[in-house]
Image (spheres, rainbow, N blue to C red):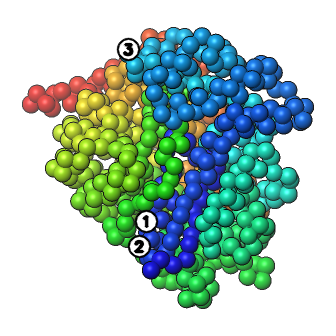
């Protein structure tokens, strides 16, 4: 017999092309414990409610009332935006060739500030696929023009995959969030609240749970919780998810409990089960696990020990049923091939293993459970879950969202998929470790693997050792080559600004990246500027890495990103523009003959890397094959 009804909400905005997996995992788990669970992806529900002709009409009226006049060219052509938006969104959801031709007709889409500058040098594939991709690109730019107008004229918090991120990032104090929650909801927020209220009235839950993966979900979750409390005072509200797990571990400020009753940390299964049992009167409040509550106006952390452990191998498959798979949209905005995988196709998100089997990287949150507790399962169990999810969703694409997928498990999974004739397409995150032989990469490709992402970080052996990555440039080269030779796309996470990194190391690192692209070892990459976090070995022992923590002062709310000074390192932010410009060219297979210094608008040293560095590592591989 099913008991208490829980409503899970993914608040705006997360990825718009596929469902965020947290609610599906928890729905699968709680339903095994006879708890009735419904879930709502408020992110895609709101997005598809905003981008309609009816809503745009109200949005343009609101902009007129507010007397804001950014992007006047959009306002001048508003009738065209209103009449075309439903066609474009429907196309981005279904991508049919007939509508693609229509979108590409001259004068069908307004030539706003993005479409008027569209890159005419992009080479599209022959035939229908190229036509659909071109229409998808034009449709994406059209939608982005509307998004720019909304943000500039109606709601400064609006962005496609986040909302009000600027006031949630490094929010050591709750003051600004509290202030904005006291303001009237914006037009966007009103629409969000209408959808939420309808859902609550239909489902009649006793507990509404918001998963908050990122800072860009926090304010929307708070706004939804605020109205839930006002309109449905008997309903309890809980927060959890990645943001809470990393940023709210030192929570002291009671004001957030005006909007929420429970805030849980780390894996949600045990805390949620205990919260439900508490609400049903089966356990006392002191029985809660890893959960903040308010008692006598004080924030109290309830954590009955020993914790109830639900091992990864014993958890059921995520249950995606009930999510609106017909509403997700595929965007095609930039040429980065891996970025396209994040924004374009439909993927079922799933973890092979819990945590990280390496858990040594000094910049990573290795002290937290989601990294530090490593748990495995069997290939047979994984394939059982894969088959169930395909049946639930009709989607055969999988993104395995592991911190680092273990090679041993990938071998077993690949063999099981092949043996059981389960045909899927998949990609995952890996470490560039030597276990990824040519033979293993070949097996993975045969089982449906099309791409891997992995951390090259700072392409410097000195700094890779300081990071405790457990790899060097030679090894990364050989492993990336093994994947690429088997037509598995390789995306490298790149980092600059690591403690004590010099200007010379930055330029040398860029040269390694250039050579890796040139030899087709990697096909995609992205630069991230290093940030110290409080849960990483660097954040906990900054003196060991030659840096000083300078803030922010903790004021009772969030604590994660730290500011630091690096007396031995370069002035890292000034390299951002040049590094990105160089990478943009390499992604497009150009610029390899350019002097590496030419990407920067200030003097930098020339590279000290030998021109044939990557060639020499690949030659070693060929020599071994010949022996």
Q: Quadrant of the C terminus?
A: top left
Coordinates of residue 128 in the picture (x, y in percent): 40, 19
For mark 3, what is the residue? Answer: 126
Examine the image and state in which quarter residue 300 appears.
bottom right
Coordinates of residue 509 in the picture (x, y in percent): 47, 30
Q: From this view, report whether residue 154 is shown above or below residue 4.
A: above
- Is residue 545 at all visible to an observer of this figure? yes
Element on which disc 1 rests: helix
Q: Do the residues bearing badges 1 and 2 touch, measured as CB atoms within 8 Å?
A: yes
The residue depicted at 58 percent of the width and 33 percent of the height is: 89
Coordinates of residue 376 in the picture (x, y in percent): 32, 63
Residue 434 appears left or right of 8: left
Q: CA distance from mark 1 to mark 2?
A: 7 Å
The residue depicted at 81 percent of the width and 51 percent of the height is: 185
Q: Nearer the viewer, residue 528 or 54?
A: 54
Q: CA distance from mark 3 to mark 1?
A: 43 Å
Q: Residues within 10 Å of mark 1 (few under 14, many from 20)?
A: some
For mark 1, what is the residue? Answer: 28
For mark 2, what is the residue? Answer: 32
Examine the image and state in which quarter residue 140 appears.
top right
Element on which disc 2 rests: helix
Q: Earlier in the sequence, mark 3 or mark 2?
A: 2
Q: Nearer the viewer, residue 385 or 619?
A: 385
Element on which disc 3 rests: loop
- Label placed on residue 281: none
């Amino acid at each position: 017999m099913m008991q208490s009804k829980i409503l899970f909400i993914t608040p705006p905005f997360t990825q718009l092309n596929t469902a965020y997996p947290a609610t599906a995992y928890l729905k699968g788990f709680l339903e095994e414990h006879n708890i009735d669970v419904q879930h709502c992806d408020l992110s895609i529900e709101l997005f598809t409610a905003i981008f309609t002709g009816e809503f745009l009409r109200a949005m343009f009226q609101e902009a007129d009332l507010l007397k804001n006049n950014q992007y006047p060219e959009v306002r001048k052509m508003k009738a065209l935006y209103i009449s075309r938006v439903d066609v474009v969104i429907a196309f981005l959801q279904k991508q049919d060739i007939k509508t693609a031709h229509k979108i590409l007709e001259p004068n069908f889409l307004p030539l706003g500030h993005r479409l008027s500058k569209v890159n005419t040098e992009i080479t599209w594939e022959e035939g229908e696929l190229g036509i659909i991709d071109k229409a998808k690109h034009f449709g994406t730019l059209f939608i982005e023009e509307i998004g720019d107008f909304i943000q500039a004229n109606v709601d400064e918090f609006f962005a496609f995959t986040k909302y009000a991120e600027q006031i949630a990032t490094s929010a050591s104090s709750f003051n600004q969030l509290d202030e904005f929650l006291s303001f009237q909801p914006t037009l966007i927020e009103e629409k969000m609240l209408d959808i939420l209220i309808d859902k609550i009235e239909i489902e009649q839950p006793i507990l509404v749970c918001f998963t908050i993966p990122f800072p860009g979900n926090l304010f929307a979750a708070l706004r939804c919780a605020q109205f839930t409390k006002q309109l449905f005072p008997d309903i309890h509200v809980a927060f959890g998810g990645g943001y809470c797990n990393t940023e709210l571990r030192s929570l002291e400020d009671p004001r957030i409990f005006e909007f929420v009753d429970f805030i849980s940390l780390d894996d949600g299964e045990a805390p949620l089960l205990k919260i439900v049992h508490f609400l049903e009167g089966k356990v006392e409040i002191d029985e809660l696990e890893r959960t903040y509550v308010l008692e006598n106006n004080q924030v109290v952390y309830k954590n009955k020990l020993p914790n109830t452990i639900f091992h990864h191998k014993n958890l059921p498959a995520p249950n995606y049923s009930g999510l609106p798979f017909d509403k997700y949209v595929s965007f095609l905005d930039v040429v980065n091939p891996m970025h396209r995988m994040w924004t374009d196709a439909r993927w079922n998100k799933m973890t092979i293993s819990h945590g990280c089997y390496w858990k040594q990287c000094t910049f990573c949150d290795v002290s937290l459970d989601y990294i530090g507790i490593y748990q495995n399962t069997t290939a047979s169990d994984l394939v059982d879950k894969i088959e169930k999810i395909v049946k639930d969703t009709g989607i055969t694409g999988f993104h395995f969202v592991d911190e680092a997928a273990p090679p041993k498990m990938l071998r077993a999974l690949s063999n099981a998929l092949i043996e059981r004739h389960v045909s899927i397409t998949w990609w995952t995150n890996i470490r560039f470790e030597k276990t990824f032989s040519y033979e293993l990469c070949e097996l993975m490709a045969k089982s449906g693997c099309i791409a891997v992402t992995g951390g090259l970080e700072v392409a410097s052996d000195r700094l890779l050792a300081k990071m405790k990555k457990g790899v060097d440039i030679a090894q990364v080269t050989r492993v990336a080559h093994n994947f690429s030779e088997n037509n598995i796309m390789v995306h490298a996470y790149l980092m600059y600004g690591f403690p004590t990194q010099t200007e010379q190391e930055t330029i040398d690192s860029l040269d390694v990246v250039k050579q890796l692209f040139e030899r087709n070892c990697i096909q995609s990459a992205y630069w991230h500027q290093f940030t110290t976090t409080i849960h990483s070995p660097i954040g906990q022992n900054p003196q060991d890495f030659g840096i000083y923590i300078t803030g922010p002062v903790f004021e009772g709310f969030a604590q994660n990103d730290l500011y630091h000074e690096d007396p031995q390192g370069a002035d890292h932010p000034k390299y951002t523009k040049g590094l990105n410009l160089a990478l943009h060219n390499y992604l497009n297979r150009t610029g390899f003959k350019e002097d590496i210094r030419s990407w920067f608008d200030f003097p930098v040293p020339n590279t000290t890397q030998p021109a044939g560095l990557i060639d020499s590592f690949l030659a070693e591989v060929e020599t071994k094959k010949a022996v």
